[in-house]
Image (cartoon, grey):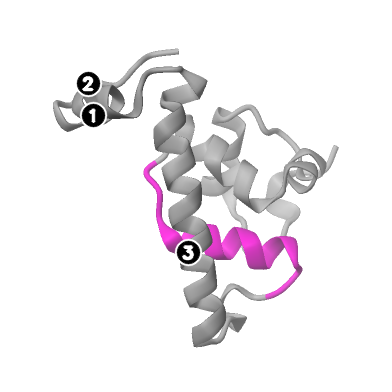
Amino acid sequence: MTAIRSIRNLGPALEEAFHAAGITSAEALRALGADAGYEAVVRAGRRPHVMAFIALVTGLQDRPWNSCDKAERALLRTRYEAVLERARSAGPKGDALPADLSAFLERHGIRAVG
């Protein structure tokens, strides 16, 4: 098994986030792909950021994170928003709470523990 940080653009902080989501190797992350992998990280409780998603996508393509042109960044932002929507509608850590209940709880600072 290869460390996640061996993937271009990914360092110890993202590696720790993937481990918290149950993804413990570069091979497992590559098999899942960027979208499903990042969704798992968000569902595990990491605060999402579009640049982390872009770093992941480009890293899995063995490209520098800043190699995207404006059009590609716009497409990646659309993918990122779709990933967040899926993660939020699934609830934390795969909990099947309805999306509106999850949003209400999160607004009030209540997070499900799983």
Q: Which label belongs to residue 110? A: 2
- Magenta residues? 47-63
* Viewer-closest of 34 and 2: 34
| Residue 23 seen in render | yes
Query: How far apart in space, not on screen, are marks 3 and 2 (Cα)?
Result: 28 Å
Residue to which mark 1 is pinned: 106
Query: Label 2 crowding class (10 Å Cα cut-off): few <14, some 14-19, many 20+?
Result: few
Examine the structure image and report whether residue 34 is included in the region drawn in magenta.
no
Which residue is painted at 46% across and 28% down in the image? 90
Q: What residue is shown at x 56% (from left), y 45% (from top)?
A: 38
Q: Which residue does the image show at 46% across and 37% down from the upper left?
A: 87
Label 3 to label 1: alpha-carbon separation: 23 Å
Q: Which amino acid, by three-letter code, is at mark 2?
A: Ile
x and y percent of residue 86 in the render? Answer: 48, 40
Classify mark 3: residues with Cα within 10 Å, few (<14), some (14-19) or many (20+): few
Q: Are marks 2 and 1 in contact (CB under 8 Å)?
A: yes
Q: Which residue is mark 3?
A: 78
Q: Amino acid at mark 1?
A: Glu
Real-space Cα separation, disc 2 to disc 1, in angstroms: 5 Å
Give the SS element for disc 3: helix
